[in-house]
């Protein structure tokens, strides 16, 4: 659905991006990762022509983006700017409504859309519509930035370090909330991050760049299990153990969870992509009497803390009993 073909960007004789290609199907999330200066932002900006490529092209639904009117692009691609980048002299309502205004939506329609998005992002409109960015916390600003990118309901979202301006704790929470946002479901997303953990948590496809060149493009587990070269192995090495643990989710354990619904016990509902480790953490906080429940493509499963511990030991040491 969105495809980059042999994108390159040169500044004089310096090559910032060198022959980068990728292809994303609808609903996929690609994370571009790599060290500072490796060409992530430049690649992302070439995707919507904020930067014009020196060579190569970007195709959306079989059409060359370079030949589309600017307005079409705004409709198709929302952009979450690095460091959030809200307009400081605009209210929250005005910030979120920027693209719909450019697209000349009727004021009533803009108001409705802005209200609906703020609601979904956990910013009650009554409280936040008229606030200015400096009156918001970092996490709230970040959500306004995402609402702004989603305003015209574009099928494609580009995000440059969307959580980069947040402190580590807010950042983790923001990442989890992010996946529950209804307006973001089924979007095709290209995100830039320098955080490998974030990439693993959010993306179905990872592209690791170095010096403007794509080192490996593939699903997260491929980078972990079959690194294409020494750089990929090194880049992942530090966090490899942790990433492997995080890739064990309730969904991956689904067949081993119970089908019968417990009677009379409180149930803590967890999303199927919750890593086993987090599920244990959340259930432990609730106490032993609480069960967990999760739903995947219409079927439901249940589990208790002890059972999760058991599964955890099994997955850690499959060779022992
Ligand atoms: N306008 C520019 N002129 C010259 N060099 C640039 C320009 N913009 C970016 N670069 C260089 O291109 C490289 C890639 O930049 P960027 O894509 O922003 O990196 P990243 O987002 O991965 O940190 C960097 O070395 C940067 O200094
Ligand atoms: Mg950057």
Image: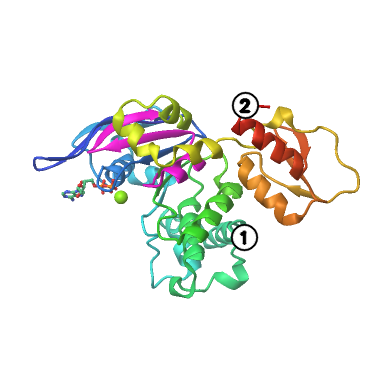
The numbered mark at residue 318 is 2
The location of residue 62, given as percent across then percent down, is 39, 27
Residue 237 belongs to the span the image colors magenta: no
Frontmost residue, 27 versus 178: 178
Tell which residue pokes out farthest to the left in this image.
Answer: 13
Q: Is residue 39 left or right of residue 133?
A: left
- Start-end of magenta stretch: 192-217
- Give the percent coordinates (x, y) of residue 67: 29, 35
Image spot of residue 132 (x, y percent): 46, 73
**Mark 1 neighbour density, 10 Å: few (under 14) some (14–19) many (20 or more):** some
Could you tell me which residue is drawn at 18 percent across and 37 percent down?
Answer: 54
Q: Nearer the viewer, residue 289 or 145?
A: 289
Q: How many labels were placed on the picture?
A: 2
Q: Nearer the viewer, residue 30 or 92?
A: 30
SS category of the residue bearing label 2: loop
Instruction: Please tell me whether residue 212 belongs to the stretch shown in magenta.
Output: yes
Q: Which residue is mark 1?
A: 119
Instruction: Say if mark 1 contacts mark 2, CB within 8 Å.
Output: no
- Report, in whole angstroms, how far the alpha carbon at label 1 lies from the one at label 2: 45 Å
User: In x, y percent, where is residue 317?
Assistant: 61, 30
Q: Is mark 1 within 8 Å of ligand 2?
A: no
Query: Is residue 161 at all visible to an observer of this figure?
Result: yes
Colouring chosen for the image of the structure: rainbow
Q: Earlier in the sequence, mark 1 or mark 2?
A: 1
91 in relation to 185, above or below = below
Q: Secondary structure at mark 1?
A: helix
The image quadrant of residue 75 is top left
């Amino acid at each position: 659905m969105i495809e980059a073909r042999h994108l390159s960007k040169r500044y004089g004789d310096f090559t910032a991006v060198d022959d980068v290609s990728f292809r994303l199907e609808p609903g996929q999330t690609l994370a571009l990762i790599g060290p500072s200066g490796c060409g992530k932002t430049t690649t992302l900006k070439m995707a919507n022509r904020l930067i014009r490529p020196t060579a190569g092209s970007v195709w959306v639904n079989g059409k060359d983006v370079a030949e589309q009117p600017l307005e079409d692009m705004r409709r198709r691609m929302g952009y979450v700017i690095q460091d959030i980048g809200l307009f400081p002299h605009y209210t929250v309502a005005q910030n979120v409504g920027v693209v719909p205004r450019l697209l000349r939506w009727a004021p009533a329609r803009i108001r409705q859309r802005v209200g609906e998005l703020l609601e979904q992002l956990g910013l009650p409109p009554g409280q936040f519509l008229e606030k200015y960015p400096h009156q918001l916390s970092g996490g709230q600003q970040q959500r306004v930035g995402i609402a702004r990118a989603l305003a015209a309901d574009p099928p494609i979202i580009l995000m440059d370090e969307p959580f980069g301006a947040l402190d580590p704790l807010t950042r983790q929470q923001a990442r989890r909330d992010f996946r529950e946002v209804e307006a973001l479901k089924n979007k095709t997303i290209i995100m830039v991050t320098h955080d490998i953990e974030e990439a693993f948590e959010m993306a179905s496809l990872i592209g690791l760049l170095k010096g403007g060149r794509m080192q490996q493009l593939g699903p997260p587990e491929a980078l972990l299990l079959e690194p294409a070269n020494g750089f990929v192995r090194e880049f992942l090495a530090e966090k490899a153990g942790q990433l492997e643990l995080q890739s064990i989710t309730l969904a991956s354990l689904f067949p081993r969870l119970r089908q019968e619904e417990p009677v009379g016990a409180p149930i803590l509902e967890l999303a199927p992509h919750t890593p086993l480790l987090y599920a244990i953490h959340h259930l432990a906080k609730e106490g032993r009497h609480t069960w967990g429940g999760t739903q995947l493509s219409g079927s439901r499963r249940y589990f208790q803390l002890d059972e999760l511990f058991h599964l955890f030991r099994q997955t850690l040491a499959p060779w022992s009993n």
